[in-house]
Each structure stands twice: as C-alpha cells, then as structure tokens.
Image: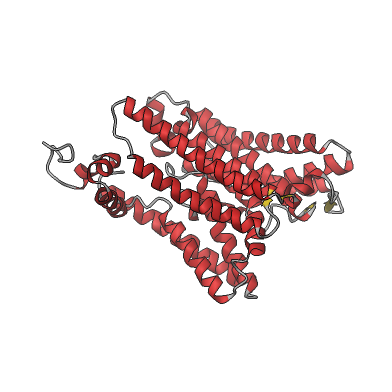
Amino acid sequence: MSPLEPSAPAGPAAQAQVDPRLLVREQGFAGYLGEFKRRVRGGELGSLPVVVGLVIIWIIFQSLNSQFLSPQNLSNLSIDIVATGLISVGIVFVLLLGEIDLAAGAVSGACAALLAVLYVNNGWNPIMAIAAAVVAGAVLGLLHGSFFALIGVPSFVVTLAGLLAWTGLQLLVLGPNGTINLPDAGLVSRLTSTYFSQVIAAYGLAALATAGFFIVSYVGNSRRRAAGIPTRTMGDLLFRTAVLAIVAFGAAFILNKYKGLPLALLIFLVVVVAADFVQRRTRYGRSIFAVGGNIEAARRAGVNVALIRITVFMISGAMAAVGGVFAASRIASASQATGQSNVLLMAIAAAVIGGTSLFGGRGTAFSALLGMLVIQSIASGMALEGVSNSVQFMVTGAVLLAAVVIDSVSRRSQKASGRA
C-alpha cells in the first residue's frame, strides 16, 4: 500500500490525517497545490485572507493616490503601527485562551502617565522610568489574572472594571494639567524619531531575517528527519526562504529610499518574533494553546491552568505598558488621551483581523503585525483622500466583521472536515 493511501475508507477525516510534508515530498508541486486546496476546503486559511486583503487595499489606495506607496508614507505607516501593535501582541496571548482584556488601553495610558511623572517631574533616569512603567503594567495584569484565575470573575468583567479603574488612575497621576510634555531630545522621544540611515542597517536586518528563517527551518527539518517523521523538501524550504527574502529586501529598499530603518519598527519586529518564538517553540507557549483549545484536556495533561491564565494577563499588561511608552514617544507627551479613544478597539481588531481566533486556540504574534498593517493602511489611505474619521471607523468595522465571519466559517469547515 502506498504511504499516501488511507487505510480507512476515504473521507475528509481520513485525508486530514495525511502529513502535508509527506504530500509535498511524494507529489512535488502537485502535492503542494493539493495540500493548499485541502487546507482551504477544511477551513485552515491561516494568514491568507489578511495577506490578500492587504494587497487589495494597497492596490486600491495606490490607484486613488500615487503617494500611498511612496517611501515616506510607508515609512510613516511603519512607525504608526508600533504603539497599538505592541498592545495587540499582548492581546493575542489573551485571545489564545479564548478570553478578552478590555483594560489594555487604560493600562497603557496609566503606565504612560507614570512614565512621564517619574521621568519629567521626578527626574528619574529614562531607562528606569520605562522599566517602572512596564513593571506597573505587569502588576496590573497580575491583578486581572488573579481575579480571573483564582476567584473566578469572568475576564470580561474584571478587565472592564480595570478599564474604569486605571482610566481614573491615569487622570490622578497626570494631575490637574492633564498633560506632561517629554523632552524632544530625550531617550523616550527618540524611540520613535530615530532612524538608522545607513543603507546596511535595513539590508542587514533583511539578510539576518532571511538567514535566520532558513537556519531555523533547516534545523527543524533535520530534527524531524532524525525522529523518523515527514519533513519538507529542500525545494520547499528554498521557496519559502525566497518569498521571505523578496518581502524583506523589498521593505528594506523602500525604507532606505526615505530615512532608513526606524528604530521603533525594529523594536516592534523583534518583539513580534520573540513572542512568536515563545508561543510556538516553548513548552509555555504550547500550554497556552492547550488551555485555549481544551481547558479540561490541558488540566488532565498536567498543565497549571491558573498559572497560565495569570501569566498571560501579566504579559498583556506589560505589553500594554510598552505600547503606552511608544504612544507617548510618538507625540512627545503623556496626556489624558493616551491609551483612550479607539486604542483598545484597534488593538483587539488588529489581532482578530490578523488571524487570531476569538474562540481561542489559534493565532500567532504575527497576527498583530498583519492586522495593524491592514488597519493603518486603511487609515493612511483614507487620510490621503481626505475621508472623514467617521467613514474610517465604519470601514474598519466592516473589515473586523469580515475577519470574524471568516474565522467562524473556518471553524465550522474544520468541524465538518473532522479537524476540530
């Protein structure tokens, strides 16, 4: 019997048990295409919808305004996604559990206010002030997680209470003036105003990312081969690496056409890669997926569910604080508006639009990056066209609804094909 022939009667569930690496190795490009079709029919769309949507958005806005894909606009866009994107990275961890953190925006604002008071009013070293703000965010997340995991208060309720409480704390910390300006030449402000203008910086990062991806993939393949389980072909690895190289070096080329590689973007990308590594390559990350996928099965497998829940909310709080730092850096001040308005909604929307499931158990840190690119591209394109904020909100809301619909249909397709 061929290794590709199922031992049971053919059907969706039987086909789902065939390892895609084996299909590609045995059938080449035809196997790759067949696996792609099977994944689409089975609802395993991954990041495909958001990537296609982003390409369509860019084509539309570029056709309306030739400045949309200009190096200056794309460089500004890459910085504008950072603050809310960092908050969204923390939101992804919470969504993987199938929970929600409604306090992330308020935490970012309160921690930005704390940073400004310590740094400007009390004369703290900026690094120490940033560290204190991040620790404060983690502590607030610890409170949310403890009430949720230990006492049993629903995450919606406890973080809604946190939203109200930390908004009040933000106003209290800022004092009657409501705004604290940061030094333009200070470290905090330079987080979003610094560019690495040397051409080698952007191209070096692109080369490092490409080489790192290939090495990690190759090592993973070697380990799978040593364990006697299916691996990807070398051609498959080279193809994936080539696609990444085109994207990375293309982005580097565009950035070097303006001011170079922004420090804020570099930090954001490092955080996203680190968070993705934690989620997909560590025991802790696999425990998060296990709890989000089936909490009872995770508990029986020996996972400390309470600890996972608490630490996930701590990560969300810490990332919210980091996002607040970059939000303050972007406008060189901390005010009552920091972390308020639509920041929370955009952070959650970015995670969902990027492919993280609201039902838990599916998503990656790269969801925050892709989702923020979609949201900020819409905002940037409409701003160039002079479209009002009201229309921007409606369009973003429609995109969010479409993402949730795709997620729901995807889960239904997976159940029908026996993969959920």
218 is higher (above) or lower (below) than 327:
above
Quadrant, the C terminus: top left
Residue 242, given in percent of the width and then of the height, sits at 44, 49
Q: Nearer the viewer, residue 154 or 333?
A: 333
Locate residue 7: give its quadrant.
Answer: top left
Tell me if 305 is positioned left or right of 177 in this view: left
Q: How is the image coloured?
A: secondary structure
Quadrant of image for the N terminus: top left
Residue at the outermost top position: 302
- In the picture, measured across the screen, residue 73 lies left or right of residue 174, that is left
- Place residue 130 in its image quadrant: top right
Q: Residue at x 75, y 35 (%)?
A: 132
Residue 290 at what x, y percent from top left? 41, 34
Residue 261: percent from left, percent from top: 66, 51
> How many tags in the picture?
0
x 51%, y 36%: residue: 277
Residue at the image point whose x is 42% and y is 58% from the top: 49
Q: Quick check: 144 above or below 328? A: above
Residue 153 location in percent, x, y? 54, 38
Is residue 83 found left or right of 186 in the rendered image? Answer: left
365 or 103, which lies in front? 365
Would you say residue 160 is visible in this rendering?
no
Q: Is residue 246 left or right of residue 75?
A: left
Can you say whether 2 is above or below 340 in the image? above
- Residue 52 seen from this side: yes
